[in-house]
Image: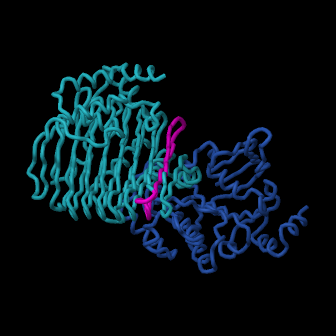
Chain colours: A cyan, B blue
Amino acid sequence: MTETKTAMTQTLNRAEDILFKRYQALASDPARARAFESFKASGLPHRRMENWRWSDFKARLDTLFARSDSHTTAQADPFETLDGIICLRFKNGVLAELPDLPEGIDILQKRGGYAFANCEDIPLGALTAALVPATYLIEVTQSYAQPIKLVFEGEGAAAFARIDCVIRPDIELSLIETYRGGAKFNASLTSFNLNQGAKLSRYMIQPATQDQAHAITSEIHLDAQSRYEQTSLAFGGHLARIETRGTHHGPESEMLLKAAYLAGPGHHIDHTSHIRHGAPHCITRQRTKGAVLNKGTGVFQGKFHVPRVVGQKTDADMQHNALLLEEGAIVNAKPELEIYADDVACAHGNTCGALDEAALFYMRQRGIPDLQARAMLTEAFISEIFDTDGQAHSALATLREAAKAWLAQLSQ
Amino acid sequence: MLKLENLSIRVGEGETAKSILTGLSLDVPRGEVHAIMGPNGAGKSTLSYILTGKEGYEVDTGQALYEGEDLLALNPEQRAAKGLFLSFQYPIEIPGVPVMTFVRTAMNAQRKARGEEDISAPNFIKKAREIAAMLNISADMLKRPLNVGFSGGEKKRLEIFQMLMLEPKFIILDETDSGLDIDALKTVAAGINALRSPERGMLVITHYQRLLDYIVPDKVHILADGKIVKTGPARLAQDLEDKGYEGVLGLAS
């Protein structure tokens, strides 16, 4: 049995072969080599691996790489309309041009490999760490009132980008991120280290890319009293996974994860998260909402890990609610709480269902056509993720409009 | 204006099929208000759903004509655009959609279906303010998600608000008085009476005669076992109140 297993990992499929060759073409260094060895142990993650059973990168990347007819163009950036903000554009993982940065934000380009500690747990993160042309080390030592925009795009078979960001004590930053795709396989790895009392808000969008695959991986480390907030809207692709791995290292840190997904025909979008409550009195709030059409697939895998001693007084809540808009829509969900501490407040909820028929009839009785009523109800359901408490917020408004535009197509 | 002829309706298939209406005939001419009364389970609310196009009902016999047109061939939004309005017995909560957005969307959808221009934003707001003031509806309520967290009485007032905004041609009121205190009942009745005109027809479905003190009908029909068993003048409602369904229907047989 062991022999068979070894033999299988040594049999590379077409996609793995392309990735292996790409690694061999790079100048080797110890950090790259270590990351690649980790990746090689499993190869591309596939459905027989517990965390990947609904998102089989091995099989799906293989079919994607075999196709010659696919149009791999980068998608439009919905945040383009936001004026006057600093933008960092990463093309195939390389910062195209370094804009003037405000004081207190420094970027260092580290060519070649850069150590990635979490290699064993995140195979696609390990692959990214092994294949990126450079890692961008960002240090934030002064708060900056405006958001900074990150745009990721690629071309060709595969594009890899990596950012490692440290936010110093009591400093605040917000980021707006667009994952435009452009390569057949677009992978990014971002790490955020929030020092004591630091605050980071991220607003992310992944436009629909039917002919492409995405692996958007983030790891977050939270020191005491820091606060991390992530709001995302994803439309999926041939295969897309947004994976978030967070660790509360210091007490009273807070993590807010808000995600919305809309999957049309032929689109697959996976939200996977793993949050470790490694310090007492930490708060995690996770809210994920999705809507899926016929031949679309949504995946939610969420895990809260609360260790016995350090996890005491954890306050964590995980909610996933999905709408199956049509027959033939698929949603797979696995919410998990792994709790060893005895003095915690942890909850999770998970629902999958159709639109409320009574509400639809009520709206149609008032003259609103069926498809428009469905779009309105879906928008109302999804837009809770972008709630601003009545405050003006241009990034959240952009996400809301992007969701609305997608839904408006349904009522045409 | 609305003419039902020998209408028989059932729900369900095969062995679970159940007859809801069994040969119901009813004629509401333009300009008249008719009341439908009847005991629990007589099919009153079902009648309102059938007329407005809710799915799940099968027509066995008969027809329903609305201004000479086959009503049952139209979908709910087409019926609404042609002026049919139902004030629901239990109005539905729609989270995330503010009242004003909802009503404006409905109004413009109906206008579009009729080939008319959208209402302008200032005209819409002006109209909404006037009608809200008449019904004692606060500006705050109009900003909140439709019916979410509203009391029973507030929901009913909001049904009448929508009705006055949309200015339908034929109005079905299903138990509009339930959940209303005396003051709210008077306000709601004044709203309904404001729409009484020679151009409109109304069907008032109610359990009790109370609402009919304020909205005096031209005719009262008693619905029992899926058909109209007795028709009379407004006074019939008072007779029912005094003698009960058994008393009145007993006299009839």
Q: Nearer the viewer, residue A389 or B127?
A: A389
- The image position of residue A291, as x and y in percent, is 46, 45
Q: Is residue A47 left or right of residue B179?
A: left
Q: Residue at x 26, y 41 (%)?
A: A116
The reply to whether residue A379 is in sight is no
Count of labels in the image: 0
Q: Is residue A230 left or right of residue A331?
A: left
Q: Nearer the viewer, residue B157 or A250?
A: A250
Q: Nearer the viewer, residue B192 or A166?
A: A166
Q: Which residues are magenta?
A: A308-337
- The image position of residue B208, as x and y in percent, is 73, 71
Judge whether A26 appears above or below A110 on screen.
above
The reply to whether residue A348 is in sight is yes
Q: Residue at x 27, y 31 (%)?
A: A36
- The image position of residue A257, as x and y in percent, is 37, 54
Q: Considering the image in quadrants, where does the C terminus of chain B appear?
A: bottom right
Q: Residue furthest left?
A: A100
Asked whether A129 falls inside the magenta stretch, the response is no
